[in-house]
């Protein structure tokens, strides 16, 4: 799977493309960790529009980044969830702790990703 | 009920086979013409069961995973079997957020997803012998046509 990076002044917008399962999890975890380390002052917006599948292994990767960002008092948000991704993240309780938006624009307009 | 179709698949416990397994079972389920959401539920549950076999039952070692799926008029029954370590404490394993591998950022949501996305999940496990997970899902969108 792929992670495509876009940067604004304050936000790293990472578009995840493909299927985030156990097989892809380790690679994607490292990619995101490296990005967050390289840009320590940025907030993170994960655009999941092209994420065609996620399971509990993928939930672990997103939850891990949430914990890391929260520990560093940085913001994280999600946008553009399809129905499979929404169902899995909803069941896992992710949508209760990470703000989620309908579009990138909507997310960026929320400033610090206020709920 | 009449069995309409079935498959049996043996695969080595490699992580790249997690997607192979879920795609094959979903392709069989698609023959009943369920909704996309119903199909995705089955796909996700299969992914969880096969991932469990890869990362827990066999850990780093390579073993065989046997996948059987049976298609009835409006229902699919999927069985995923390994001959790995077995599950030590099944009750704990089924609890949401419980994981034996927290250091690997595992979410502990595998069984919760299987149980929520399928109608019924039966787990038969014995330490050092292996685990069989049998999951059923009825497709409400599909009308049985009768015998």
Image (cartoon, coloured by chain):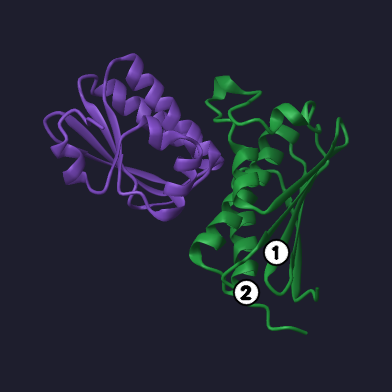
Chain colours: A purple, B green
The label shown at residue B76 is 1
Please rate how many residues cluster around mark 2, counting C-alpha atoms within 10 Å: few if below 14, some from 14 to 19, many from 20: many
Residue B58 visible to an observer of this rendering: no
Q: Residues within 10 Å of mark 1 (few under 14, many from 20)?
A: many
Q: Is residue A107 above or below residue B31?
A: above
Q: Are marks 2 and 1 in contact (CB under 8 Å)?
A: yes
Mark 2 vs mark 1: which is more N-terminal?
2
Q: Residue at x 42, y 47 (%)?
A: A86
Comparing B57 with B145, the one in front is B145
Q: Provide residue B5's location: percent of width, then percent of height.
A: 74, 74
The chain that hosts pointer 1 is B
Residue B32's disc is: 2
Camera-nearest residue between B24 and B98:
B98
Q: Nearer the viewer, residue B40 or A18?
A: B40
Q: Chain of mark 2?
A: B
Percent coordinates x, y for residue A102 in the rendering: 26, 48
Residue B139 in percent (x, y) is at 62, 66
Position of residue A82 relative to residue A43, above or below, is below
Q: Is residue B10 visible?
A: yes
The local secondary structure at tag 1 comes to strand
The C terminus of chain B appears in which quarter of the rendering? Answer: bottom right
């Amino acid at each position: 799977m792929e992670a495509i990076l876009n940067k604004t002044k304050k936000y790293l917008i990472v578009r995840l493309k493909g299927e985030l399962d156990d097989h892809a999890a380790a690679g994607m975890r490292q990619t995101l960790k490296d990005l967050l380390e390289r840009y320590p002052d940025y907030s993170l917006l994960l655009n999941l529009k092209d994420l065609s599948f996620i399971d509990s292994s993928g939930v672990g990767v997103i939850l891990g980044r949430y914990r890391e960002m929260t520990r560093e008092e940085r913001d994280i948000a999600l946008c553009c969830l399809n129905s499979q991704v929404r169902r899995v993240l909803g069941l896992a309780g992710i949508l209760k702790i990470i703000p989620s938006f309908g579009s990138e624009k909507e997310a960026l307009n929320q400033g610090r990703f206020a709920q | 009920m009449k069995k309409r179709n079935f498959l049996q698949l043996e695969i080595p416990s490699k992580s790249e086979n997690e997607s192979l397994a879920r795609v094959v079972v979903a392709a069989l389920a698609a023959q009943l013409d369920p909704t996309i959401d119903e199909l995705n539920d089955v796909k996700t549950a299969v992914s969880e069961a096969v991932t469990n076999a890869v990362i827990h039952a066999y850990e780093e070692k390579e073993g065989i995973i046997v996948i059987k799926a049976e298609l009835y008029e409006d229902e699919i029954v999927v069985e995923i079997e390994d001959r790995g370590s077995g599950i030590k404490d099944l009750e704990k394993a089924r609890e949401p957020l419980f994981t034996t591998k927290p250091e690997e950022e595992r979410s502990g949501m595998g069984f919760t997803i299987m149980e929520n996305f399928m109608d019924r999940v039966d787990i038969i496990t014995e330490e050092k012998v292996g685990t069989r997970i049998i999951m059923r899902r009825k497709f409400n969108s599909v009308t049985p046509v009768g015998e």
